[in-house]
Image: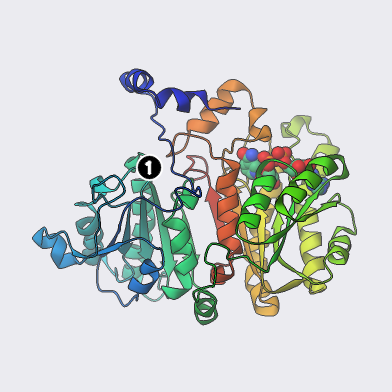
Amino acid sequence: MADRYLSLTGTAPGRFLTRRLGLPQPAVLHRWSPDRPALDGPVLHLTAGPSALDLAPVLVRTGLTVTTRRPEDAAAGDPGTGGTRPAADGSARPAAAVLDATGVRDVDTLAGVHAALHPVVRSVAPSGRIVVLGAPLDPADHHQSAAQQALEGFTRSLGKEIGGGRTVNLVRLTDAGAAGSTLRFLLSPRSAYVSGQVIDVLAAAGSARQADAPRADPGRPLAGRTALVTGAARGIGAAVAETLARDGARVVVLDVPQAEQDARSLADRLGGTALTLDVTAADAGERIAAELPDGLDVLVHNAGVTRDRRLVNMPAERWSSVLDVNLASVLRTTDALLAKGTLRPGGRIVATASIAGLAGNAGQTNYGASKAGIVGLVRSLAPRALAEHGVTVNAVAPGFIETRMTAAIPLFLREAGRRMNSLAQGGLPVDVAETTAWLADPASGAVNGQVVRVCGQSLLGA
Ligand code: NAD
């Protein structure tokens, strides 16, 4: 279902009218395309407080021109040093700013955040990116914890006010090298609908840095890998399969037997294979393992259903069918594929939660429970799966995404769902797919146990 309001505000008279009426002004987002694969300008490297982070090599690998602006430059009104080149439109407007705030330890050094970003925030180009880098909270130092937690409130507030399709995210890290794939994702058009997120990149820094070594073909990070996506015949799952194939993976498109035709034509188009299977079958894990005797690298649990009804009117069957597809089958197949060793070391599991599982939603006690269960699964399994199998476990939590599922929502609720986020529009299946591809990247080994919302910073459950 097309977003007609977004089309209207894209015209001069529509923009004039909606501005006059004080209505939301969604920007047309810059998403990845082969013609426009990167942001259109330099990235500013800013610092607040003393920092020991070796960020420069990681920023260089984003492919963007880096301009370094030290705190003393800001104080002197100096534009900073580095190879700033004009942006595609002839201006040198930064397309992104990365603020290293890992050295912020108290309220005094926190002022450096304001000092660094206040002079430049207005200059960041539309659809630009602000990434704040923080440190893990130190349980032995309540001043450091207060100052670092303050970055979360700062990030989320700036995300809500910045507008123009710009995003603001916080990454907590200890080793810049381990966060390379995360910064490349956040500083690219691939993360167009990810805003207001706090992402911890704290695990296994050494091994992750090794995995982040430059590759023969950086455009195909999943070359030689096999990925299986459940519920991939249509909607978000189909976009995930396409995006993982774009990144070089051989994909297995899994869906129910009724969707066989769609699954096969997608698999044929992507040079992959189709597997028709109901994920709730007791032997689903065994059948997937039998289909993949050489093993699996990326497992995306995307299949999901809704059977909405308020609890007072909900028969047990509506409850159990949703819990079975969305949660129990995910637990069963994950357990089976880990136990059989089908998921190879270096493997990635990405499960699909929902903001309904974080914020709750009237009429969705079954769905909300199933999606919150995914969050519990991820948080508990992630450290063990990494330690015992070398496999990371993360979740994406989509907000309002333009699919058949959301097209079925009554008009007024649908309009509210679309606008109630910082980007004032619904996301596209490809936004969830790009986020999944980042988590599936072999270089994302230090991203584990995270629940990343793809919701344009939805006001729900924020
Ligand atoms: P969709 O209904 O368009 O597609 C779901 C796919 O899963 C279908 O192809 C369906 O046949 C398949 N499927 C359902 N039950 C299955 C089973 N038992 N075995 C195998 N395949 C099965 O849904 P979508 O909007 O693309 O959503 C995909 C995922 O994202 C779901 O987990 C959903 O809960 C989640 N999600 C979607 C939104 C949204 O706005 N669309 C928001 C939050 C979360």
Q: Nearer the viewer, residue 449 or 462?
A: 449
Please, is residue 88 above or below residue 317 in the view? below
Is the residue marked by circle 1 packed among few (<14), some (14-19), or many (20+) residues within 10 Å?
many
In this view of the protein, can residue 36 be seen by the observer?
Answer: yes
Residue depicted at x 88% and y 61%? 287
Residue 16: where, in percent of width, then height?
32, 20
Residue depicted at x 55% and y 76%? 211
Instruction: Report the label total.
Output: 1
Disc 1 secondary structure class: helix
Residue 245: where, in percent of width, then height?
65, 56
Residue depicted at x 44% and y 40%? 29
In this view of the protein, can residue 450 be seen by the observer?
Answer: no
Left or right of residue 435: residue 404: right
Please, what is the three-letter code of the amino acid marked with disc 1?
Answer: Lys
Quick one: which residue is furthest to the left in this view?
A: 76
Q: Which quadrant of the render holds ligand 1?
A: top right
Cβ of mark 1 under 8 Å from ligand 1: the answer is no
Residue on which the image places disc 1: 160
Please, is residue 127 above or below residue 218 in the view? above
Colour scheme? rainbow
Instruction: Find residue 2 and report its image quarter.
Output: top right
Left or right of residue 253: residue 379: left
Q: Nearer the viewer, residue 376 or 335?
A: 335
Left or right of residue 234: residue 155: left
Instruction: For the N terminus, give its image quadrant.
Output: top right
Residue depicted at x 68% and y 72%? 385
Left or right of residue 399: residue 66: left
Residue 369: where, in percent of width, then height?
69, 47
Instruction: Find residue 55 and report its image quarter.
Output: bottom left
Instruction: Find residue 77 and report its image quarter.
Output: bottom left
